Amino acid sequence: MTAGDVDLDKADDEVITAAHGAGTDRTRELLDRVVADRFGDPPSGGVGLAAMDDGAVVPDATGGRATVVTTDSHVATPMEFPGGDIGRLAACGTINDLAAMGATDPVALTSAVVIEAGTPVAVVDRVLESMAEACEAAGCTVRSGDTKVMGSGEVDGLVLTTTGVGRIERGSQLTTGGLSPGDRLLVTGPVGDHGIALLAAREGFDFETPLESDVRPVDGLVAAAREAGTVTAATDPTRGGLATAVNEMADAGGVGVRVDERAVPVDDATAGAAEVLGMDPLAVACEGRMVLAVDAADAAAVRDRLRAEPGGERTAVVGRAVADHPGDVVLDTGLGERYLTVPSGEQRPRIC
Amino acid sequence: MTASDTLEFRDPDRAGRLVDRLGSLVEETGPLRVMHVCGSHEEAIAEFGLRSVLPEGLTVAMGPGCPVCVTDLPEVDEAVALAEAGHTVATYGDMVRVPGSEKSLADASAAGADVRTVYSAGEAVELAEELDREVVFFATGFETTAAPTATVLREGPPSNFSVLSAHKYVPPAMDVVAAHPDTRIDGFLAAGHAATITGVDPLEEVVDRHGLPVVVGGFEPLDILLGLVRLVEDVRDGAAAVTNAYPRCVSEAGNPAAQAALWEVFERVPGEWRGIAEVPDATLRLREAYAEYDARRRFDVETPDGDGRATDCICGEIMAGRAGPEDCPLFGEECTPDSPVGACMVSDEGPCRITQEYGGRR
């Protein structure tokens, strides 16, 4: 076979593996290949599917406004975990994706629930209650929904799919790649709490200090940041953590990024647990954080403003965009330098 | 670990002073090439980006220090065969995805075999106590994991428990690497955790045979930099000796109780280190007195005859310090952490996995 031929046998045999869903290179490669091309050109003046951003921006045909829309499916094992549950996770995920596109005042959410037969009604009740609480915190609610029940074993517990709709001034959207060399990168709080807390709960590890997910809506923080200065890009670090988020920003913006590891806020309990598990807090999921690129002149003002907001107390300037090494992220560890890469495969505790 | 420990062993100012010291030493000695023999050293060097600050003239090569990587292909095949024969196979997590001749334990598990991940030999014994079936512990790793395997066997595990030993013993492999004509090295940075068990005696033998300095080093960034300073000092002074640069954990004598257990249960026999060579006296087999727990004697293990090595994978050259991951034609293309060809891409201690994860050397 020569380069350029398509290996049909391989394509026919190929199956989806867990790695395709881990938010890594494999996920990206699959989406590029089977999804991105199929769903049209980007809307004029907006953001389409192929951009693989946090959501889409569809400008109105007339007038100066645009609609922002985003959708996500959520699964979580366990469904209820320290600091939250799958209901809170779903609502916050959607609200935060809207916020990452600049839509900080959500119009409405929809929610489709697939439930495994045998799931206690009390669990469904609690999950939907915390979904409602998260919506209330963000000043929105679920306006439409659907419920399906699958047989026992046909789905694992609950699958929640939420869609969010927001409205913005035309052209005012934030994107992942809007940053330019010189811009500073801010993260709105400690990273890795969600991923490490969930892993510890799932594996039954008992650490001295309780670990809690950071899951929370951060639309208010994005709005506050934009009041305090010029925000040029935003993305919420979820699967693959801060490492994936800053790589996406570097890629999409065609810039290099330098991150100072010592400046990245990591909770002591999370850092300790991650060390024991052999995992990197920078590479595991967050659910209540935002990474913002900010004009250098405004970085201190935005940081100080965010530190005064609830949920933003530990905002830090962690890096900057540079013209060198476009698409790559260099991490200054304080002792030396290396690349900060997108984690490959699912992060697992180190054993041997 | 507390925050103050972290600061103490990762302090940039102290690191800077050690790096300066290395720089002036290497100006005196000229270009040097030293080898570490531990995946945890490589992991720390890559994680903290230490190579980016080392003096140009100092090359720190990776040696045969990843226990998962040196586990031989037929040993993986034996574990897969036992799992497919319907026995429960328990092993360390990193081993599960290592490809054998035809398949990995993960493949066997996906096809219905019972493969369990354990965190210790003791946990494998607990599994045997819970289950009403044969539990085979696929025991891999160096002195640090072999000693605990020995301990559970001495304590009389249940009769449905057995051990498929792929344990290896490091010092003879250092001999093989030092003696190889293509491996030019000026000294070894030895693994501190193995030395906590064995003490420094076995390393004295390496020094005697090859006239090379050996420094025992720890795993925090400052431990590694200090170990390198001591090693380059020894090279400069022509001091062929063992230096302990990790005295807060390693004593001269090591852990006599662990050594007693280790050598009561295991004997050293010749065996293949995956891709590197047959190493005399460096594979650990259960002694006659423990034959009843030896999975190879308890079961009739049939493994595929095929030569699964017929790929372009150069794990062996990499593990012997004669090539780097980026020299391999499969690296990052056919061989990735999601779909590894060689064991070096599977383990967190594998040089290819580490290079992939930390984006190569700077």
Image (cartoon, rainbow, N blue to C red):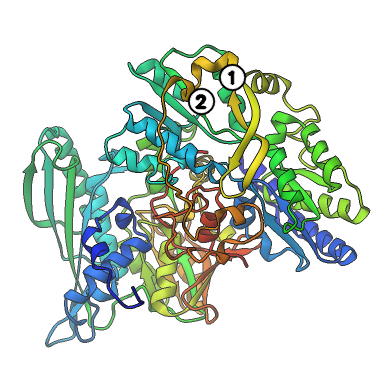
Quadrant for the C terminus of chain B, please: bottom right
Q: What residue type is labelled 1?
A: Thr
Q: Where is residue B79 in the image (x, y as percent from the top left)?
A: 43, 34
Check if mark 1's residue and mark 2's residue have beta carbons within 8 Å: yes
Q: Which amino acid does label 2 sit on?
A: Ala
Q: Do labels 1 and 2 share a chain?
A: yes
Name above or below for residue A223 compared with residue A177. above
Chain of the residue where label 2 is placed in the rendered structure: B
Quadrant for the N terminus of chain B, please: top right
A121 left or right of B209? left
N-terminal-most mark, 1 or 2: 2
Q: Please name the residue that numbered disc 2 is placed on.
A: B121
Chain of the residue where label 1 is placed in the rendered structure: B
Q: Please name the residue that numbered disc 1 is placed on.
A: B151
- Residue at left 33%, top 33%? B84
B266 left or right of B139? right
Q: Position of residue A132 (x, y in %)?
A: 18, 49
Residue B96 visible at all: yes
Circle 2 Cα neighbour tier, 10 Å, few/some/many (<14 / 14–19 / ≥20): many
